[in-house]
């Protein structure tokens, strides 16, 4: 029986980034509420000397060790050392890899951290996520020309969730909030207008999400921000504003999952990219030198 007054410690020992073990361990720990548990992570552990140091420390502090180590020799060493030091351990990935290998009739690569190889696509996604964070909610309008997609819309029309979802696909997204009383940044009209995607939502949905937002912030539910009449005026203004810019595709986010809305935007972007690339090819005069 665990004494709720005693702090327990869980060590994450990984030969890669430790993300897998952290996620699984944190998910498991949610099943034990009211307990004081600290988690320490040791990443890119790839030598027996490091393994011994961590397990000895775990033995001294009475920590439980969760490990994701792909090298069979190191896994065996951890188990043997844990028995000697009386440390409780859990192997998250070793037995799964072994059983999958048996099922698939194949030999695993046994390469630590292979799921996080730092290839070009990985760096592209990381860069896109950083870009989305720095250019969220109109923070840096001078960067709009660097974006692949620019989302505009009233408050709570799903701009930020869409930005982050698309960023994880390696697409640089900036988003700009629209307010009837404040002009959009001038930079919005100085870039390729085909990058701009206008978001809208129906009245009932926007009243509901804004009311929930006020509740979450602990603000009065009757604030102007969530009043039906005020939101109706904002939506009418927004429709008129969008109508002045026919290049912008207007996408309704009402009752739609982020994935569904993003898929529509990516379809439009793909069609435009294909059309523009075709135009670029046909604009080259046959027989003329190209650069």
Image (tube, helix red, strand yellow):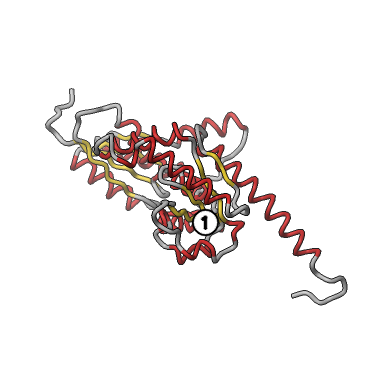
At a point 81% along the width and 64% down the height, the residue shown is 282
At a point 24% along the width and 45% down the height, the residue shown is 56
Location of residue 143 in the rendering, given as x and y in whole percent from the top left corner:
47, 64
Counting labels gives: 1
Quadrant of the frame with the C terminus: bottom right
Q: Residue furthest left?
A: 5
At a point 42% along the width and 51% down the height, the residue shown is 180
- Dot 1 crowding, Cα within 10 Å, few <14, some 14–19, many 20+: many
Location of residue 98 in the rendering, given as x and y in whole percent from the top left corner:
51, 34
Q: Residue furthest bottom?
A: 289
Along the horizontal axis of the image, is 3 left or right of 181? left
Task: Answer whether residue 111 is visible to the viewer in this image.
Answer: no
Looking at the picture, tell me which residue is in the foreground, 73 or 265: 265
Location of residue 247 in the rendering, given as x and y in whole percent from the top left corner:
62, 54
Is residue 204 placed above or below 244 in the rendered structure? above
Along the horizontal axis of the image, is 110 left or right of 180? right
Task: Answer whether residue 167 is visible to the viewer in this image.
Answer: yes
Looking at the picture, tell me which residue is in the foreground, 168 or 77: 168
Is residue 119 placed above or below 55 in the rendered structure? below
* SS for dot 1: loop
| Residue 35, image quadrant | top left
| Residue 32, image quadrant | top left
Give the residue at mark 1.
Answer: 172
At a point 48% along the width and 58% down the height, the residue shown is 127
Along the horizontal axis of the image, is 28 left or right of 220? right
Q: Residue furthest top?
A: 1
Quadrant of the frame with the N terminus: top left
């Amino acid at each position: 029986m665990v004494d709720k007054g005693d702090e327990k410690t869980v060590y994450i020992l990984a030969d890669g980034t430790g993300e897998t073990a952290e996620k699984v361990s944190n998910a498991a720990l949610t099943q034990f509420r009211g307990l004081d548990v600290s988690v320490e992570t040791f990443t890119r552990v790839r030598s027996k000397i490091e393994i011994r140091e961590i397990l000895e420390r775990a033995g001294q502090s009475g920590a439980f060790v969760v490990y994701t180590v792909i090298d069979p020799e190191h896994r065996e060493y951890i188990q043997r050392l844990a028995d000697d030091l009386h440390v409780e351990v859990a192997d998250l990935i070793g037995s799964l890899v072994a059983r999958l290998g048996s099922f698939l009739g194949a030999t695993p690569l046994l390469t630590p951290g292979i799921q996080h190889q730092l290839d070009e696509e990985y760096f592209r996604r990381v860069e896109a996520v950083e870009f989305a964070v720095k250019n969220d909610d109109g923070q840096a309008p001078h960067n709009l020309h660097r974006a692949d997609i620019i989302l505009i819309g009233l408050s709570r029309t799903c701009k930020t969730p869409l930005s982050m979802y698309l960023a994880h696909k390696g697409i640089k997204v900036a988003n700009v909030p629209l307010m009837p009383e404040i002009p959009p940044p001038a930079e919005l009209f100085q870039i390729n207008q085909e990058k701009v995607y206008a978001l809208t939502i129906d009245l009932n949905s926007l009243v509901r999400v804004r009311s929930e937002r006020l509740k979450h912030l602990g603000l009065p539910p009757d604030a102007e921000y969530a009043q039906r009449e005020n939101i109706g005026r904002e939506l009418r203004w927004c429709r008129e504003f969008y109508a002045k810019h026919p290049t912008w595709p207007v996408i309704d986010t009402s009752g739609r999952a982020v994935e569904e809305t993003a898929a529509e935007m990516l379809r439009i972007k793909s069609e435009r990219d294909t059309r523009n690339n075709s135009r670029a090819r046909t604009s080259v005069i046959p027989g003329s030198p190209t650069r």
